[in-house]
Image: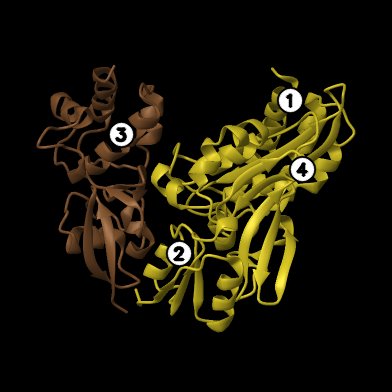
Amino acid sequence: MKMPITLRINGEDYDITVEGRTRLLDAIREQCELTGAKEGCSTGDCGACTVLLDGKPITSCMCFAVTALGKEITTIEGLARNGELTTVQQAFIDRGGLQCGICTPGMILSATALLEETPHPTKDEIRFALAGNLCRCTGYQKIIESVVAASEAAK
Amino acid sequence: MKDFTYLAPTSVPEAVALLAEHKGSTKVLSGGTDLMLLMQDGVFAPDYVVSVRGIPESNVLSYDPNRGLTIGAATPLRAVETSPMVREIYPQLATAAGEIGSVQIRNLGSFGGNICTATPSADGVPALISLGAVARLASVRGEREVPLESFFTGVRKTVLEPDELLVDLTIPAPGPRTSGTYIKLDTRPQMDLAIVGVAVTLSLAADLQTVEKVRIVLGAVAPTPIRAREAEEILTGHALSDSVLAQAGAAAARAARPISDVRSSAEYRREQCDILTQRAVRQTAARIRGN
């Protein structure tokens, strides 16, 4: 059954039409045309679909779009302001925390949420926070270093 | 998956009325991290999905020294995991919550969903049973309270009626000299199913040696989580010593009825019930003593 809903993404209202079964990931990618969030596994295991819901990382493939009504959604596209990258984004570039980039939007969003809560995390705390984001390219070390660098740049 | 009508009641009476009206073709939605998978695989194909995330009683996390802890069925696991109050008073619950999935999963998922999905390895369940948790269920026929220990009847089977709702869980306030531990044995630090899960809630007598009360609950080693009652009896009223602990561990291993599967053999699981029961009791005793 199709129904009109409004999703609030990166501070903007998107008026779209979804069904009950439409996943938040699909609403974001297809109807809102924000393709930063990726489909990696469709079972909530890889984190490539990570977005922030009221500031908290969630796997958007595990979420029906209708359940996100009235919440603030943040996607990777919502981080940079007027083309200026955030500290976390810049750190991933400077430290080489990405190769193919598929996991990167999710990694950056999870890392951003972590640093909001824990501005100077240990490496173990970073690994714990990013445990729901899988990477097939980098072997994770440079991702961890990027988050450390971001936390130090913010000091 | 098949499309459905999404319903978002804002009270328990409204919710149970919907479940009764559409009985047989509904599923209750909490975080959705299990339900979504089951619906994608076609295990469930409801015409109506009833979300409980808008029901205030199902989203609480509150403590009162008289009534104890109340956790709403839909309260996110991440809230339980990170709550300073839960970490101090019910550390085994904070640990158990934090062992499920990843941060992303725990921002959506809930104990209610973990319980109602009712897999043998459900991480939330042993700690909750060890604390004497009581589930409050509601339907158009009224409310009933079921000790969580009696809630499970088999693999993915519970006493929940098709039109019944799990509203919340109540956990008694701990007495003095009481604490608990949950140990999950798995191959990865996160994002893994338990090979064995052991929860202990322990109360020591004033001498801090003698066991006043203990509950030992084993997960992933039987169709449902089980109490290791023989092990509990061995410990109760006795001072904790290496030999008493060894006997209790052996009894816990005997209580287990594990299977061999892709994660582990039955023999290894049985052995780990022994080792982890002893470890969980030792760790809890140390915490009570303030070591």
Front-most of residues A16 and B157: A16
Q: Nearer the viewer, mark 3 or mark 2?
A: 3
Query: On the rendered structure, is B171 left or right of A79?
Result: right
Which residue type does callout 2 highlight? Leu
Instruction: Give the brown chain's letter.
Output: A
Mark 4 Cα-neighbour bin, 10 Å: few <14, some 14–19, many ≥20: many
Can marks 2 and 1 be said to lie on one chain?
yes
Label 1 secondary element: helix
Q: Alpha-carbon distance for marks 4 and 2?
A: 31 Å
Q: Chain of mark 1?
A: B
The residue type indicated by label 1 comes to: Ile
Q: Which residue is mark 4?
A: B215
State the mark number for residue A111: 3
- Give residue B247's quadrant in the image: top right
Q: Residue extending furthest left? A: A83
Task: Work out which residue is located at the far right of the displayed protein and give it.
Answer: B237
What crowding class fits label 3: few (fewer than 14 Cα within 10 Å), some (14-19), or many (20 or more)? many
| Residue B12: x %, y % from top left | 60, 67
* Residue tagged 1: B288
Residue B152 in sight: no
The color chain B is rendered in: yellow
